Image (tube, rainbow, N blue to C red):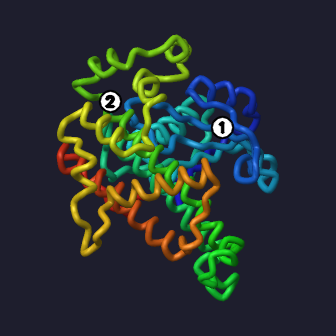
Amino acid sequence: MGCDCTSYFPKGTNPADVEEFLFLLGFKRGKKGPFSGMLGTPYSYYKDDDYKHITGLYIELYRDKDEQDQLKLWTRTTIWRSKYDSDFHNYTIKQLRKRFGGHFESDYGRNRYFQFDGPVREKAEAGAYRAFSLFFANIQRVDHFIGFANLLDDDKYKIQGIDFMDSHNPRILSANILIPFIVSAIEDYFRSLYIALLRYSPNREKIINNAKLQGAEIAAIDKGELTVPEAVAKWMNFQEMSKVNSAFKELNTKYDIHGILKRPYGRRHESFWEVLNRLISQRHALIHRAELQTEYQPFKLKSDIRLVEKAMARIYDELITYHKWQPVDRWDF
């Protein structure tokens, strides 16, 4: 699903000239792979400018042998694009036509530009949106793995309830080894969200001064490899919930992660805060001591995935309410 357009160049147009123009627009040549370069040479555009871009723009330059070697350029953004992605898509096809002539066929018709009617997000709001969308994508990967591996199918490798036998059951092992990935997704969400909020925080200068960045981080910033907020967050611990809470409270006392996650959820006795701490402890036991919990069955994993998803969504929803950001439809992700 996405927004597609094909530009048709006049006969005699040199592909090298088109490529040179693409570089001037800011595109970078990509590599051919299983899902890229299927038509021709792949290029992409992405710019981290106040989190304005979400998907960037992907294109392929090729000759269509079915149309007498017609030189074409296929451009695409996904349905999750931002307004700035959409605007740059229109700008690209407009400038190509202006420079080389010819015409284009978009999803809207011949020489018709794309329209955007979605929400416009910038700065911290856009950064928080991106952080949650990346987290959600990681959780979907786990869901796809569970379905692909049939982990919930008890007819295959039936769980016996006997510790020695279940410790060799691939379904039990799979459920356990997915925990480190889930914890990594949680950690990445907190880190990405923290960076986005720090970047525009009124306490930014104070926090950066207290961070006392080392030479390696300063050198990376100078080379453009890290932003200052990324350097501050690089060595912070986002796998210990008490430190996560302290870090966000330093940004704003209203960012009370502990308070948000301790509030009851339904009739459950275990709060979201306790769920995350349990999973983090389970991750550490597996990674550092190879401890396998034979009672941790796939259906428990599935339940925990939904709880983690709801916990992160609750944090995001609290930020949306506090900052009066635009609401998010879960179908956006």
Answer with mark 1 or mark 2, whichever residue precedes in sequence.
Answer: 1
* Residue 304 place in picture, x, y as percent: 44, 66
Nearer the observer, 139 or 281: 281
Q: Is residue 189 something that shows in the picture?
A: yes
User: At 69% across and 74% down in the image, what residue appears?
Assistant: 169
Task: Identify the secondary structure beneath mark 2.
Answer: helix
Examine the rendered structure and indicate whether residue 26 appears above or below residue 258: above
* Residue 247 place in picture, x, y as percent: 32, 34
* Residue 45 place in picture, x, y as percent: 56, 35
Task: Identify the secondary structure beneath mark 1.
Answer: strand
Q: Amino acid at mark 1?
A: Tyr
* Residue 253 place in picture, x, y as percent: 18, 36
The image quadrant of residue 276 is bottom left
* Residue under label 2: 198
Q: Quadrant of the C terminus?
A: bottom left
Q: Is residue 126 something that shows in the picture?
A: no
Do tag 1 and tag 2 residues touch (Cβ < 8 Å)? no
Examine the rendered structure and indicate whether residue 134 appears above or below residue 49: below
* Residue under label 1: 43
Q: Is residue 91 left or right of residue 286?
A: left
Mark 1 to mark 2 CA distance (whole Å): 32 Å
User: At 69% across and 39% down in the image, what residue appears?
Assistant: 10
Nearer the observer, 218 or 270: 270
User: At 75% across and 28% down in the image, what residue appears?
Assistant: 16
Q: Amino acid at mark 2?
A: Leu
The image quadrant of residue 24 is top right
